[in-house]
């Protein structure tokens, strides 16, 4: 039976980034996949992480950067970047900020992202 999900869950994070989870463990109880709408202010970045999930990032506006093994990959509006489980990565955004969607397989969970302490 189809489910209509109308109320995303706002995930609190520091640094001015806004995460609204549309489907996933926090919003709908789904553990196989999560989809979140993200908005990050200019210059935002987060600590390195080594997640247990694949992440597909679809950029709507601005640029998203992904640093991995000393290389910074820049993903522009209309592009997609995919990271694999176990990769040590760090996300950031460009000087204009960014709006993007993150799809995680399996679903994002705080205990499977493995963010490094800052």
Image (cartoon, helix red, strand yellow):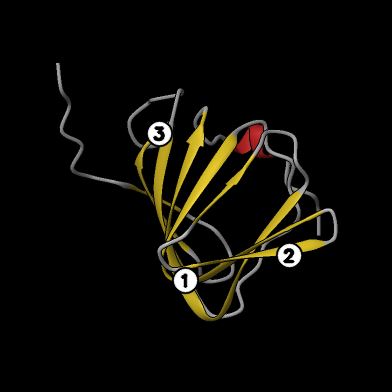
Residue lying at 78% horizontally and 46% vertically, measured from the top left = 88
Compute the Cα span from label 3 to label 1.
22 Å
Q: Which mark is residue 70?
A: none
Q: Please tell me whether mark 3 sits on a helix, a strand or a loop.
A: loop
Residue assigned mark 1: 98
Residue assigned mark 3: 24
Q: Is residue 39 left or right of residue 48?
A: left
Kindly report which numbered mark, 3 or 1, lies closer to the viewer in this rendering: 1
Residue assigned mark 2: 72
Instruction: Give the mark, 2 or 3, whose residue is nearer the N terminus.
Output: 3
* Label pair 3/1, CB-CB below 8 angstroms: no
Residue lying at 47% horizontally and 71% vertically, measured from the top left = 98
Q: Position of residue 104 (x, y in %)?
A: 50, 37
Q: In terms of depth relative to the viewer, which is nearer, 3 or 110? A: 3
Kindly report which numbered mark, 1 or 2, lies closer to the viewer in this rendering: 2
Residue lying at 40% horizontally and 48% vertically, measured from the top left = 36
Q: Position of residue 13 (x, y in %)?
A: 54, 58
Residue lying at 68% horizontally and 33% vertically, measured from the top left = 85
Give the answer, above or below, for where 2 lies relative to 15.
above
Labels in figure, total: 3
Q: In terms of depth relative to the viewer, which is nearer, 73 or 97? A: 73
Give the answer, above or below, for where 41 lies relative to 23.
below
User: Circle 3: is it few (<14), some (14-19), or many (20+) Cα within 10 Å?
Assistant: many
């Amino acid at each position: 039976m189809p489910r209509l999900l109308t109320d995303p869950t706002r995930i609190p994070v520091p640094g001015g980034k806004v995460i609204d989870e549309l489907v996933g463990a926090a919003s709908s109880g789904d553990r196989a996949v999560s989809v979140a709408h993200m908005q990050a202010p200019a210059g935002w970045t987060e600590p390195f992480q080594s997640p247990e999930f694949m992440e597909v990032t679809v950029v709507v506006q601005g640029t998203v950067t992904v640093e991995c093994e000393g290389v910074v990959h820049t993903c522009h509006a209309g592009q997609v970047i995919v990271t694999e489980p176990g990769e040590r990565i760090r996300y950031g955004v460009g000087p204009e900020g960014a709006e993007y969607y993150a799809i995680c397989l399996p679903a994002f969970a705080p205990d499977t992202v493995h963010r490094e302490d800052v």
